[in-house]
Image (tube, rainbow, N blue to C red):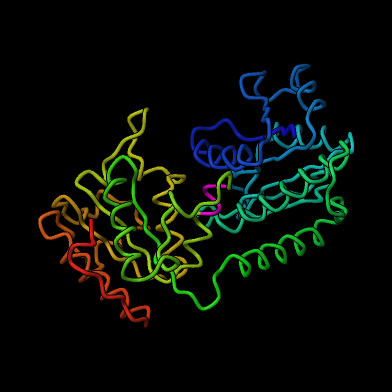
Amino acid sequence: MRLFLSFSFRDEDRDLVNVVERLLASHSARIASSERLGGDNLVGEVKQRLLQSDALVALFTRRDLLVDGTWTTHQWAKDEYEYFCRHNKPALALVEDGVRVGGIARAEEIIHLDRRTLLPALLALSEVLGRWRQEFAQRQGAPQAPLENPRSSGEQSQKRVRRKTTRRAAARKPKGVPRVFINYRRENAQGRAGRLADNLRLYLGEKNVFFDQDDITPGGEFVVESLHAVANSRILLTVIGRDWATVKDDFGSHRLAKPDDLVRLELTTALEHSLPIIPVLIDGAPIPREDQLPMELHTIIRRSAVEVRDTRWTYDIRYLAEKLAEQLAIEPRFVQEGRLR
């Protein structure tokens, strides 16, 4: 499936664009855009890329604040969207909260986007992408189940997306099974986090601990499945090593300062769902300072932390497991001293 992604080229939108691009790629989509091809003008090569694409996803983000409190969006994104729609191909608009979208032609698929809570928009986008992929495969002769008509009205489409998202959430959530989600940063604590997950499963049961390396579906949509698992969990453990708050990306920016950082997204999703968050300190790490955290994560430093030390690993894990079992209202298994590793 060939997808054209229309978006603002501003630096403040880059993190959001990166998240959407990763989701599109997880659906095996080949992505094209007009970036570096003429800016805000529909030059010939831009039109050619639009015509060669099977579907279009447009990000209508905030640009200028109007006197009535609404926002304009980026004109070239609207131009690309309208040009594409004139050729009767499926198109979807991700519209940031507050953006005025009047005048956009045939906006059959509209998903409202709140940057503080990305999960609902990502789930809705994933549902539409899955439907498009089935439709294109069916056109090429692959056997597929009958599909709903994706070209319904915007209101009907949004209702359908919400119903499907709700059904998928119910299907994925283990009935009656409490979950502990392990949040960690790979550059900082991957080995310890995996060891923690393995040991907690001995006490709490295999299905009661979610660890991405083991529990993400092979070929699955990593960001969507991770955030979905957080929303369906009962407790989140965030594993904090010495440089947890200061790890930088390849461009020298602090990862935790980026809105699309997966560790940050998982933590904010947990806060939005009122999950208890337990900091698990390893390698003698202290609780991060408030000035090292985004404002929405400041409450984490006021949570009661548990320290897990290599010199007392078995004792500390047993203590943590007992506390978790108490919160989950389950009986912890008895584990012989020598079985933890």
The answer to which quarter of the image holds residue 27 is: top right
Q: Residue at x 40, y 58 (%)?
A: 267
Asked which quadrant contains residue 234, the reply is bottom left
At a point 60% along the width and 43% down the height, the residue shown is 23
Boundaries of the magenta span:
221-225
How many numbered circles does the render carry?
0
**Residue sitting at 59 percent across and 37 percent down?**
21
The C terminus: image quadrant = bottom left
Query: Where residue 188 sits in the image (x, y, percent)?
Result: 27, 43
Q: Vertically, is 6 above or below 206?
A: above
Left or right: 15, with 7 as reference point:
left
Q: Nearer the viewer, residue 212 or 48?
A: 212
Residue 330 relative to residue 151: left or right: left
Could you say which quadrant of the image residue 56 lies in? Answer: top right
**Which quarter of the image is occupied by the N terminus?**
top right
Residue 52 shown left or right of residue 322 in the figure? right
Residue 224 within the segment the image draws in magenta: yes
The residue at the point 12 percent across, 60 percent down is 312
Q: Is residue 146 above or below residue 259?
A: below
Residue 136 drawn in magenta: no
Residue 230's x, y, as percent?
A: 47, 62
Q: Foreground: 221 or 37?
A: 221
> Does residue 89 sit above or below 278 in this rendering?
above
Q: Position of residue 325 (x, y in %)?
A: 32, 77
Q: Main secondary structure of the magenta part?
A: helix
In the image, 96 versus 158, the foreground residue is 158
Residue 248 in the image: x percent, y percent?
A: 31, 35
User: Relative to residue 32, is residue 213 drawn left or right?
Assistant: left
